[in-house]
Image: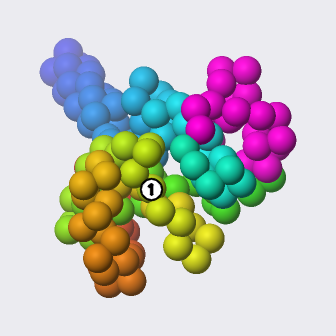
Amino acid sequence: MKKQFTFIALLFLLVSTSLFAQEKAIFQKNGIAINGHDAVAYFTDNKAVEGSESFVFEWMGAKWLFSTSDHLEAFKANPEKYAPQFGGYCAYGVSENHKSPTDPNAWTIVDQKLYLNYSKKVKELWSKDIPNRIQKANEYWPTLNKPN
């Protein structure tokens, strides 16, 4: 009986450890998406705008900050419209079959979708062939987005 209990306890420990070790579907730092920038502002203000803890919404396991209550409400109504593609990971990196963090100031909107990049330098590489990069990233993302 003691061996069976030990085995079950060990199995529980292994399963719970692997669950906590999985990467997040949304790129985040300290639980906050887009390094605290307002996802809606990219579309409405055409620039990266820092959000505020006064306007926060939890979605997909991350906190999303907004600069205004109107932006918060717009995101709540349709988060998929405003959230960056590929979970906010670097779109160029995903097109190269890997996940990379992003700089909220390195961004592009293509066909009403937000794409973030690792840096402004990487954004330059991304910008040289956006349609092909999006196609490749869309091919790789389902596999990259699977839990480890």
Report which residue position mark 1 lands on: 107
The stretch drawn in magenta includes residue 36: no
Where residue 144 sits in the image (x, y, percent)? 29, 61
Task: Specify whether residue 118 is in view.
Answer: no
Above or below 13: residue 103: below
Measuring 58% from the left and 77% from the top, which residue is drawn there? 111
Where residue 134 sits in the image (x, y, percent)? 38, 76
Where residue 8 sits in the image (x, y, percent)? 27, 27
The stretch in magenta equals 49-75
Circle 1: residue type: Trp
**Along the line of sight, the residue nearer the viewer: 2 or 145:** 145
Q: How many marks?
A: 1
Above or below 125: residue 74: above
Task: Specify whether residue 31 is in view.
Answer: yes
User: Is 34 left, or right, of 8 in this rendering?
Assistant: right
Measuring 28% from the left and 34% from the top, which residue is drawn there? 21
Where residue 15 sits in the image (x, y, percent)? 29, 35
Q: Quadrant of residue 13?
A: top left
Measuring 20% from the left and 15% from the top, which residue is drawn there? 2
Q: Quadrant of residue 56?
A: top right
